Amino acid sequence: MSGLDKPIPMSSKRVTNLRGQAKVPGDKSISHRSLILGALSVGQTKIHGLLEGQDVIDTAKAMSSFGALVEKHENGYWTVDGFGVGGFAEPEKVIDCGNSGTGVRLIMGAMSTTNITATFTGDASLNRRPMARITEPLNLFGAKTYGRRHGKLPITVVGAASAVPITYQTPVASAQIKSSILFAGLNTAGETIVIEKEKTRDHTERMLQGFGAEVETETTSTGHMVRIKGYPELLPQEIKVPRDPSSAAFPVCAALITEGSDVLVPNIGLNPTRSGLFETLREMNANITFENESFQGGEPVADIRAKFSPNMIGIDVPPERAASMIDEYPILSVVASFAKGKTLMREVNELRVKESDRIDAMAKGLRSNGLSIEEGEDWWSVEGREIDGVKGGGLCETFLDHRIAMSFLILGMASKSSVKIDDSSPITTSFPIFESLMAELGANFQKSEL
Ligand code: S3P
């Protein structure tokens, strides 16, 4: 989504009896990392189940601009012929990462310790997001970064000619900061160390190990520590990307709030650093079960069955769980609207700097549908109206944010009057088949006028 495309307003009407299997696309986090690590290996990496959302396509294009050969093959798999650690070619054009914070932050890290210059930009949403959290540690490696005021994109990175390793405590719980530093540490002599207070998603650590890097992790009283040794020779891999738990959240939550529903969402990555939403929903009395639990490419996976759950209750979501469900608060607030009592979400200031200010976006949209929201800088709460009590009828602004758009369409599926969003086009960034997949289950979404 460039932000220049024409908005596509959409409405969602109340439905019942969602049925069937929801085969959601590949994990976004793992897809980005597969392409980047494929480029950082010498030889051919094969990727099955890559998410073909715009965010990941933009990362694929970026890797081509830096000299990798990235190709999609007829039966759906992708290959990356990599240039190896430190093998980045200087791109001829500006790298446009579109809507993707993960893409731009991980790629800036990976190239920042190679002696080339690259300029990065994104859409209106990405160019508003904080980047100093990335450029600060990259400068410590010896890179030079020149951006707009307050460290915003567009940013030019002049990679360090001979990078020095760093030990860095992340100021906020962010897998993007951690991963950016670990990727920078690859082309740096010696040992780079990242310490985080709360453990964030660990796909980078797992995948780096899979590609042959020396990565050690340790949890101590000061936090979670990751060490990486510089100059590894990364070996190309064959990767099966599990389906995305953050996308699975939408059909799962839709089934919980629509009468008579029983939906199976197969083969979902359930890495404990990502599965906080499902734990939270179970504590709210949601009828969710895991079936066929197994392992795929170093990640735990399972089929998730979700059934209509008319007796959910509001809870105080444990703040230490925030990192493991950070992308899921918008859809959780929708489920909370149909529960009995208040759901309180604390220590979630990071929500204010995602693709949109997600507390503000959800609070505005939920209020326009008759809900009561309270909010502070780093917390918010939703007063549940129980299963049949949400009025709906609102028009919700989506602020170029895919998860806000999908959340309000799910809200409409169980509200008394239909819910409208001003723009469904950002959904393609992470879940390009959302509309058709939800329609197959029984959703009634219609393109509409504002
Ligand atoms: C991601 C990390 C999270 C998440 C984003 C994907 C990743 O961001 O919100 O959608 O793939 O590393 P932060 O790590 O900045 O919280």
Image (tube, rainbow, N blue to C red):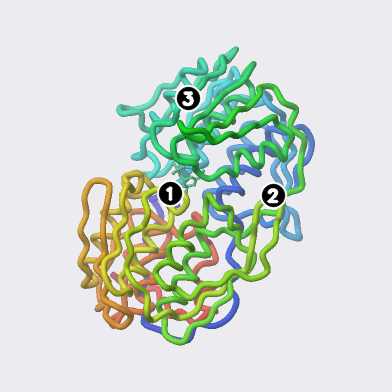
Residue 6 visible? The answer is no
Judging from the image, what secondary structure is the residue with disc 1 in? loop
Q: Quadrant of residue 405?
A: bottom left
Frontmost of labels 1 and 3 is 3
How many callouts does the rendering have? 3
Query: What's the amino acid at mark 2?
Result: Gly
What residue did someone put label 3 on?
168
Q: Give the position of the C terminus as an image quadrant.
A: bottom left
In space, the residues marked 2 and 1 are separated at their CA atoms by 34 Å
The residue at the point 74 percent across, 34 percent down is 212
Mark 1 or mark 3, which has the lower sequence index? 1
Q: Viewed as shown, does residue 54 lie left or right of 374?
A: right
Query: What's the amino acid at mark 3?
Result: Tyr
The residue at the point 77 percent across, 32 percent down is 42
Query: What's the amino acid at mark 1?
Result: Ser
- Depicted 126 relative to depicted 296: above or below: above
Mark 2 or mark 1, which has the lower sequence index? 1
Residue 93 at what x, y percent from top left?
A: 54, 31
What residue did someone put label 2 on?
298
- Depicted 147 relative to depicted 447: above or below: above
Q: Residues within 10 Å of mark 1 (few under 14, many from 20)?
A: some
